[in-house]
Amino acid sequence: MSANVPAHSTLISRQRYLWGIRLRMWQRNAVDFWRELRQRPLALLGGIVILIYLFMAIAAPYLTTYDPTRGNLRMRLEPPFWYPKGSWDYPLGTDAQGRDLLTRIIYGSRVSLAVGFLAIGISVVIGTILGLLAGYFRGRFDNVISRLADLLLAFPYLIFAIGVMAFLGPGFANLILALTFKGWVEFFRLVRGEMLAEKTKEYVEAARVAGMGHWAIIVKEILPNIVHSIFVLGTLRMGHMIIMEASLSFLGLGVPPHIPAWGSMVAAGRDYLLIAWWVSTFPGLAILFLVLAINVFGEGLRDILDPRLKIE
Amino acid sequence: MSVMVDRNTQQVPLIEARGVRKHFLLRPGFLARTLARAQTKIVRAVDGVDLHIWPGETLGLVGESGCGKTTLGRVLTRLYEPTAGEIYFEGHPLRGDKVMYVNGDGREEVHFYRLAQIIFQNPYSSLNPRKTVRDIIGVPLRYRGITDPLEREEEIVRLLRRVGLNERHLDAYPHQFSGGQRQRIGIARALAMRPKFIVADEPVSSLDVSIQAQVINLLEELQEEYNLTYLFIAHDLSVIYYISDRVAVMYLGHIVEEGPTDALFESPKHPYTQALLAAIPRVNKKARRERIILRGNVPSPIDPPKGCPFHPRCFAKKGRICEEEYPPTFQVGEQRVACWLYDQYPVAQPRYTTTGTREEDHD
Amino acid sequence: MSDTPLLEIKNLTTIYPTKRGNVRAVDGVDLTLHEGEILGIVGESGCGKSTVLLSILRLIRKPGRIANGHILFKGRDLLTLSGREMREIRGKEIAMIFQDPLSTLNPAFPVGEQIRESLRLHHIVNGRLPWPLDRAARSKEKEIVLKIMEEVGIPSPMDRYRSYPHQFSGGMQQRALIAIALVCGPSLLLADEPTTALDVTIQAQILDLMRRINQERGTAIILVTHDLGVAAEFCDSIAVMYAGRIVEQGPVDQVIGNPQHPYTQGLLESRPRLGERGRRIHPIPGNVPDLVDLPEGCAFAPRCPYARPECTEGPIPFYPVGENGHVARCILHA
């Protein structure tokens, strides 16, 4: 990989040469990552489970023919397939409205995953941008935002979200808003802290003395060193977001009731726990396995990304 | 070793600092200030420095922690803006981070970073761990104006070879290199800009003894080849002795003594310099000096004492005047010393005449 | 000095297993130290000098282990002692100070308390009541602490007793460390690069203090350093280490004044020397070898200007050179 491309190449092939280098670097990193992941079977399992859920969410209409919102009132509270009364028509049974539980769980994954990704995504973006600016430029901006962050941090997350949802009313967008309202704070603090630490390092001074402007330094020099922490925290917090969504839905403050969501399914099944335990339990298990998978994968991710960078 | 410049030739120093100060403010938080009346403290890192460096020479800057040498090095590369004072490059003052640069083709205003670069002390944190060697050295090349990526690549390889590495290392990351190799990468990066002046901030302090020698030799070769001027900052006096043409000794933000290396090491005039030289552990028994053990600790630049900054620890203190007034700089033989013990000598005059410092007046 | 050595290290080998193989950080090291003697171990980073000290106190962290050898302290082999017996030795008979005082001192406790902790751990002051109640014992302990703070040169010990480490300067912190090490009156002090992080004038003060302690208390010292100048001025005898082995050893005047091993010569050549301005420095070419992959025979051979085929054939023993026990591990002197 050295400079032995003939001197009279055209501009196009020169660019292609450099992109070729970049591509090969990406490939090398991807191969390394895969190898590390294979050495951690638990994290790998977590990753696979997450992919299964993702698949469920995307391919939902193709996986089941039932309508998740309308049920057959004559088939209320049917038990799962291994019961004598159960059948493979409704493998996990039905709920109080005769809706197939498996179908609702599959469709419910859409809500949970969408909320998880969006709430985290927006929190990360807001928190990161504010953190980078506050950490790099300091001054009054930093003071104000940091105090705001401290203020928000003082509220317990769930109570806060309940308050916001009660105020705004149910709805998907409102839910995301409620979650990100406080969600960005953690990322802000993380990014700001890392920025403060990196800013003192000499490679930043070296970039300045090479002529780089402040924005270029923030984005091209410092941010790549912070990205891995953001990634790890984001992955771990996503499980948190999903649980928040489930809790809010359980309390009836999440998405509107006709949209299947695991939390509200658990709530709806409360009245029937003794006679039809499956109505609450299976949605609950769906939440459990997804969050568990995310946590385990996130920890593996932290393991893979961190020590490699600390080799000195 | 570089050539001593004859002062009779009316040659202008490459770098000149006049009255440079750099103060940092420590401001307590809002609440501490209003409720507890906490004061803003001033760290006087550099507190009135005059120095000059001739083209092609190496000026060694020594001092202990807290003396301000690192800060001064940063100010002279414009990483910090001086709180007060002026900096001149070949007689032209720096305006902001730009300066007038005259060469054979004419004159233009350039960013100072095209002329002055810096090599850092810490080989671990001075290279971005997420960047390859190609990117690290490529950045200054891009800002020098080499936009064509392949031309850049050739130049990077050339620089790498010059510092003793090769193109196999282009795609590697810093953590794959040893300390000495990382310093070489840092040197290549500094050279990429083709500067005239390089501040070497303790470039060998973190390296093993045998690697230090390799890097020192490399820096000397590069100076010869590219006609560079160095400000070599170090606390290791043996290295300073070896590589410097002239030496300046700093204490608490001031230069207390300055002069040609041989003269200064042979007969140091300032009491601090004497103590410093006496404290160096020496292999060569004959070169060992009588121990001067200084009392007390290196003071903090937040609260410097009134008068001569060294007087609380000075073993040769003259009297009240040391405590009350900061001494002027006296010319003692070839050395310039800021110490009341020498007030029978003439006050040092600037050893050069500047032919006007305004762009309009120049030639 | 009596005839039985205070410390005798015989054939010490300490290994760190890594993914790529075993690293022989210390490879068959022999050292002898008498009461009141100052021994310097000199070498570059990675040569194993710090590991020797850690091995003496058996502070090698797993998966590293001491694979072989005997460490005889006052006649007892330290490697055969139980954990409890070792704990009685550490701090009381053999003490150690490290390079960076700020990370060795506990930032959460006052300095005086940390010095006293050493006394307490070794029950130097014995009372009859349980410790929290025994006022007499506690005040006696405090007295001892204040005395030693004065001895190491910490001004106004009464006020400084309650100060925290971060309120001390670098030199003061190192003095505090020395106080902790000495308060129980050990006969051997191990010092791992104690002055490397300090300014040169402070370094002079600390070395002066250590010399005073050696003279007044008769404490033997093993000083590990990479600075030949420090070793030359401070030590009675020196051992030069390379890649886990001692390559040259002997009285300091002999080793420094008349070095016989090419590595020692190379080290001395590659340092600028004050008073000899025109002298060029000659770096040792190449790099320190990978300790996993050591060649047969002399580890320095690849970089040695006098290397011969016999150098890499088999293990090289010590050959006597010069006087007074000056030896070098080099076949040039066979």
Image (cartoon, helix red, strand yellow):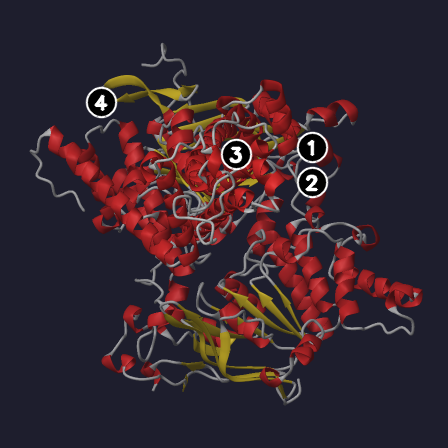
> Do callouts 4 and 1 point to residues on the same chain?
yes
- Mark 4 element type: loop
Quadrant of residue A111 in the image? top left
Residue B347 appears anywhere in the view:
no
Inter-mark Cα distance, 3 to 1: 50 Å
Inter-mark Cα distance, 2 to 1: 8 Å
Identify residue for label 3.
Answer: A187
Residue drawn 51% across and 63% down? C229
Q: Earlier in the sequence, mark 4 or mark 2?
A: 4
Identify residue for label 4.
Answer: B104
Label 1 is found on which chain of the structure? Answer: B
> Do callouts 3 and 4 point to residues on the same chain?
no
Instruction: Kindly indicate whether the residue at mark 1 contacts the one at mark 2 (C-beta within 8 angstroms).
Output: yes
Residue B152 appears anywhere in the view:
yes
- Inspect the image, locate mark 1, and give the three-letter code of the amino acid beneath it: Gly
Instruction: Kindly indicate whether the residue at mark 4 contacts the one at mark 3 (C-beta within 8 angstroms).
Output: no
Identify residue for label 1.
Answer: B307
- Mark 2 element type: helix
In front of the other: label 4 or label 2?
A: 4
Q: Is residue C84 above or below residue A33?
A: below
Residue drawn 71% across and 51% down? C108
In front of the other: label 2 or label 3?
A: 3
Inter-mark Cα distance, 2 to 3: 51 Å
Instruction: Kindly indicate whether the residue at mark 3 contacts the one at mark 2 (C-beta within 8 angstroms).
Output: no
Q: Earlier in the sequence, mark 4 or mark 1?
A: 4
- Disc number placed over residue B311 in the picture, else none: 2
